[in-house]
Image (tube, rainbow, N blue to C red):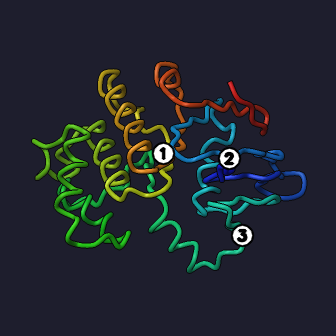
Amino acid sequence: MEAIEAVIHMKEVEKSYGSGNRQVQVLKGINLSINENQVIALKGRSGSGKTTILNLIGALDRPTNGEIYFQGQPLSHLSDKQQSEYRRTKLGFIFQSHGLVPLMTVEENIEFGLRVAEVSREEWSTRVKSAIELVGLTNRAKHRPFELSGGEQQRVAIARAISIEPPLILADEPTAELNSSMAFHIIQAFKRLVKTKNMTMIMTTHDPAVMEMLDKVYTLEDGRIETI
């Protein structure tokens, strides 16, 4: 039987900030392998390192020690240009700050993400429509971010990330501003997408109801990780 290669493999990853007496070690020898077609979560107290892990996997930051592999390739070997390419074409980001372009409509924000990821223009219309329908914002497609609630803006950020159909989505508290019904709907949609589009999703969450729906949950405590 052919071995399954991990989408992400973290090997003895450490991350520290500061120096000397002021040095703070956030991550201490993290070992973690995540296979494709999964929705997994990182949980832990504020400051436990959840967002740090997402930033390291997303090549927005570099480990102090250790290595992170994406589909078997070490991220540390990528040049700045290659890291940028990796972020644009292999990843979908869902940030707590949403990161929407203020003067663009919902549709235009999603199109912008597709353009950056170099998705063929012929696919834009279909992908935008499908992503907007999936997050339940069809009647808000022509609205700009300032005309939307926080929860609706979060759903636009989700739609933009999934429309790219990347191998990996990194999501920082993607359901934090959603009511329980919409959170359930979004997580169910994530689970369908990872199965049908060969995607993998790594998210952070504090919501016990969301955790119950996921494939795996990893707890971060004192800079180390464990499975529950």
Foreground residue among 132 and 178: 132
Name the residue tied to disc 1: 171
Mark 1–mark 3 Cα distance, whole angstroms, equals: 22 Å
| Amino acid type assigned to the residue bearing label 1 in the image | Ala
Q: Position of residue 116 (x, y in %)?
A: 36, 71
| Amino acid type assigned to the residue bearing label 3 in the image | Ser
Residue 152 vertical placement versus 69 (above, below): above
Name the residue: 79% across, 34% down: 222
Q: Earlier in the sequence, mark 1 or mark 2?
A: 2
Which mark's residue is nearer the viewer, 1 or 2?
Answer: 2
Q: Position of residue 34 (x, y in %)?
A: 63, 45
Mark 1–mark 2 Cα distance, whole angstroms, equals: 32 Å
Q: Secondary structure at mark 2?
A: loop
Name the residue tied to disc 3: 76
Name the residue tied to disc 2: 1
Q: Earlier in the sequence, mark 3 or mark 2?
A: 2
Residue 25 vertical placement versus 208 (above, below): below
| Circle 3 residues within 10 Å: few <14, some 14–19, many ≥20 | some
Q: Are marks 1 and 2 in contact (CB under 8 Å)?
A: no
Which mark's residue is nearer the viewer, 3 or 2?
Answer: 2
Foreground residue among 225 and 32: 32
| Circle 2 residues within 10 Å: few <14, some 14–19, many ≥20 | few
